[in-house]
Amino acid sequence: MTLPLISVIIPTYRREEALRDSLKDLLQQDYPNFEILVIDQTQTHEPETEKYLEKLAKEGQISWFRLNWASLPGARNYGVRRAKGEIVLFIDDDIQLQQGYLKAHAENYQRQEIGAVAGRVFDRMKLADSAKTNATKEEPLAIEYLPPEAMDPGIAWYHIDLVHTVKPQQVISARGCNMSFRREIFTKHDIWFDERFRGSAVREESDFCLRLRKSGYQIWYDPEASLVHLGEETGGCHDISTRSLKYQLTFYHNHFLMALKNLTISEQFRLYAKLFDCHVLGNPPCNKSGSPLKIITRGIFYSLGFLNSLITFIKSGWDKGQIYTRQDAGV
């Protein structure tokens, strides 16, 4: 089997030790045919990180691009335009890898119907939960096949579990910290990440995958293509804390924008209802505080997020919002 060239794209923002460790893991991969593109939106690194990145770039081990804006979808698009590989693989800048990771992604593309691979993600929080489970001698959760609801665009986001699922299968979406695509998805089918997804860009990969499926390609989940996601609070490619009010507004904006762009009316209503039940009222699986004040506060952000997304969606009639792509002198 001829192993395809893989372009590994790492968007990064204000990460230091975690970025260095992620690169060390990646550089130790035994896959013989890959390149690394670091899309760096950090204005000033710590001296140790600066020297490390300079050394890797000088030795030709990475291609290091420095930008003066912070946008995760913008960084992804920027990297794809400079990628040389047949396969484009995205990882976060706070991950841990084992040997065989790149090969696991690559082997799936022997099947022509597969256009994207979703890898398994072991979240640091999930690992902590597993440790508690083992301490109580309970059996760790393992899912063989996802339920049918995990393929329903209206409610899939509450049923697709790429942490505990152990069998390969077709899925509706990947997770942004561990996903790969045929490069022709971008170059031939002209499907790119939507740069109007803000903040941590939650749901930008879901939006992309929903549009990808219309090309006829399948998204295949491979649990062997696994990594550990450390889940740092900030960084990666967003400049706001997940606890900030700005994050809450962008969280709802991005969910509603994904729905307005891709879902039927009935699918939208199912998503809106579940979003309200889980994230506003706090019911499972969100399990948020039931304090009336907090519910009202979350309800306000829910409403503002919808109105904000509606404005964004209406503007898409004349403005697609790809502002970082337009700024790219390489286009």
Image (cartoon, helix red, strand yellow):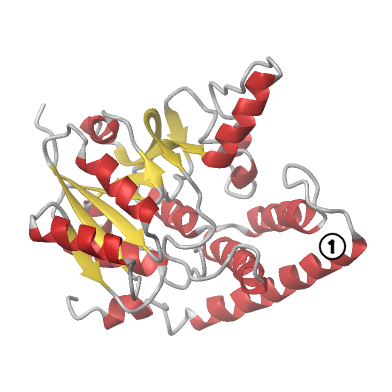
Residue 301 in the image: state x and y as whole percent: 73, 71
How many marks can you see? 1
Outermost residue toward the front in this view: 47
Label 1 sits on a secondary structure element that is helix
Question: Is 103 left, or right, of 240 in this rendering?
Answer: left
Q: Is residue 238 above or below residue 284?
A: below
- Quadrant holding the C terminus: bottom left
Classify the position of the N terminus by image quarter. Answer: top left
Q: Closest to the observer: 81 or 216?
A: 81
User: Residue 49: image x %, image y %?
Assistant: 29, 60
Compared with residue 331, is residue 272 higher up or lower down, i.e. above or below? above
Is the residue 67 above or below the residue 60 in the image? below
Q: Position of residue 255 (x, y in %)?
A: 60, 61
Q: Nearer the viewer, residue 35 or 185?
A: 35
Residue 62 in view (yes/no): yes
Q: Give me the residue at 30% from left, 75% from top.
A: 325
Which amino acid, mark 1?
Ile
Q: Mark 1 — residue?
A: 295
Q: Residue at x 34, y 51 (%)?
A: 215
Q: Nearer the viewer, residue 300 or 156?
A: 300
Which residue occupies 51% across, 83% down?
Answer: 315
**Number of residues whose C-alpha sits closer than 10 Å to that of mark 1, classed few (under 14), some (14–19) or many (20 or more):** some
- The part of the image, by quadrant, that contains residue 15 is bottom left
Asked if residue 11 lies left or right of residue 64, the reply is right
Quarter of the rendering containing residue 247: bottom right
Residue 188 visible, this orientation:
no
